[in-house]
Image (tube, rainbow, N blue to C red):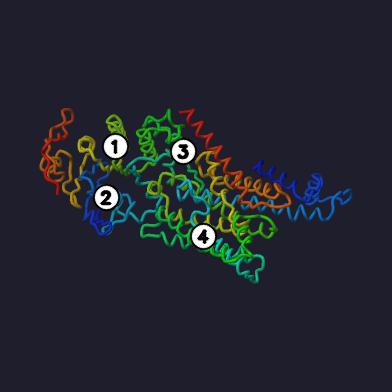
Amino acid sequence: MIEAKQLTKSIHGNSILNGVTHSFQAGCFYGIIGPNGVGKSTLLQLLSGAAKPTAGEVLLAGKPLDSYGAKQLARKLAVLQQGGLPSAAFTVREVVGMGRYPYQNWFGDEKNDPAALIDRALEAMGLTALQHRQLERLSGGERQRAALAKVMVQEAELIMLDEPTTYLDIGYQIHLLDTVQAWQRERELTVIAVLHDLNLAALYCDQLLVLHEGGIAASGPPREVLNESLIRSVYGAGATIVAHPATGVPQILLQPGGSAPLR
Amino acid sequence: MLLLAVSMLVSLSIGSAGILLKDVWGILLHQLIGGSDAGQTWSAGDVAVVTQVRLSRVLLAVLVGACLALAGAGFQGVLRNPLAEPYTLGVASGSSVGAAYMILFGYQTLIGMWTIPAVAFATGVVTLFGVIWLSRGRSGMQLETLILSGVIVQSFLGAFVSLMVSMSNSVVNQILFWLMGSLALKSWGHVYVLIPFLLIGLPLLFAYANPLNLMVFGERHASHLGIRVERTKLIVLIGSTLLTAAAVSVSGVVGFVGLVIPHLIRLIAGPDYRLLIPLSAIGGGIFMLWADTIARMAFSPKEIPLGVVTALIGAPFFAYLLYRSKRSQEEMA
């Protein structure tokens, strides 16, 4: 689906990513994890075309990212940005409808009426009752759901989520990732998510990519990737890994006093 | 639209020459549809006052107001800053420097009365490109840098204008009067100059209404939806600047319209630029027309500078609207 080839990025002379190569398969749920400042969001920005790599290239369906037109790319690839939507006086329905922009012509019309599609996205995110409310009158969680509904309406095959669960309470975290997962399985979408929470990453992702020191420290299914020595070497934290009683995926229990000295 | 038409008729009907109301209407109808000359109660002088002086001035007020409000909406959309207005990026200061220089040294060129407008227009446009050049980095224009560059250039050029004002005692009033803005002693020629700018500027900005809507959530967000952000910013900024420079070169620096009218329309009609852009043009036209009518009628036959009127009636009105919308929001919450 999308392929990173020797991606290198330096900002103001500081090397952030150093030759990251990875191939993301279609229909999989990928999680990018790693400690703060390791370049998780930078990698996502390079993959989505929001930033240009210093060296290397990104291939989307076999073609370089910059060979796509702006709207053409937006029909293939949708991004849920970190921090959610800023406040605005538009109504929820108007905001969700903005996701149709890549399908609109110069006048802002499109061939098929998107109303039904927007209705479905609003319903999936539980926003039907709020659809005529202005965005600035929503709570942070509601706003994040509106942002996700807008990404759904964009109908891309590849969805990128940059820390989608930050600032949400556990109920909304689970609801949001459940929705994304159900929708990903139904449409066989490819999802690449930057996640902070290792336990959530293990629960929802088919594949994990662990970034460390500008490169990929490990990659594979959560069961293979998440182990105590990796947590210690990448995060410098002591942890005990247990199997989730219901699903069997690895879950991490932190150990007080187990931290390695900071470098 | 209807309000605009009514405003134009009322404004046409009043003036310092003291022509009877029925005569004004008679002249207009006569000019429009023709008819016999029998039974005319007006003189040839009255006809000249109505068609040459009043009608051109009314149209000019509408055009200047429309240009400035439109440019204001454009600047606010791109800069995503509620304080942005047509003069934020230093266009007006640039124009002022050019105009003040020409007034101070009394240069006249082959184009006669067009010298000052032409020079003001040119220096205004040059200023914008200077500001864009200053703020241009490898990754495009950063909004903060753009606004800061505008502010710096504006105060730098403002110093030149003040310098020129202080250098000359005899023409000081002329420069100041130009700076404060006026539509007095303008002709049909000025109207014809502004029409093409509006005819190009309005559809151009309207075509970018949807991208401007999506930019509300930030540039990255817009680019993920397939908008070419840098191109949109550049085109809207240049379009808005041309409108501003054209209006300023004709009328001087009339403040407040470009800042307040788009906000006012936003309070009434919501944030959608597809409504905001055309309605700002109409609203700006109406507002400027009334401001100019007051400017020429309040202490008739002496005129007050247009900029004074726009601020005097605009600010309290805007304050009232702001207060009311805050109140209604609190009641709903």
Q: Is residue B301 left or right of residue B79?
A: right
Crowd rating for badge 4 (residues with CA inside 10 Å; few <14, some 14–19, many 20+):
some
Q: Residue at x 12, y 37 (%)?
A: A239
Is residue B300 shown above or below B161? above
Residue that carries the numbered disc 3 in the rendered image: A90
Q: CA distance from mark 1 to mark 4?
A: 49 Å
Q: Which residue is at the front of the view, A167 or B93? A: B93
Is residue B97 shown above or below A154? below
Q: Amino acid at mark 4?
A: Gly
Residue that carries the numbered disc 4 in the rendered image: B158
Q: Secondary structure at mark 2?
A: helix
Please name which of the two marks, 4 or 2, marks the residue nearer to the observer. 4
Crowd rating for badge 3 (residues with CA inside 10 Å; few <14, some 14–19, many 20+):
some
Query: Which quadrant, please, contains the C terminus of chain B?
Result: top left
Q: Are marks 4 and 2 in contact (CB under 8 Å)?
A: no
- Which numbered disc, 2 or 3, marks the residue that appears first in the sequence? 2
Question: Can I make out residue A61 in this image?
Answer: no
**Which label is found at residue A43?**
2
- Which numbered disc, 3 or 1, marks the residue that appears first in the sequence? 3
Crowd rating for badge 2 (residues with CA inside 10 Å; few <14, some 14–19, many 20+):
many
Which percent across, then down, holds residue A157? Answer: 33, 43
Query: Which quadrant, please, contains the N terminus of chain B?
Result: top right
> Disc 4 is attached to a residue of which chain?
B
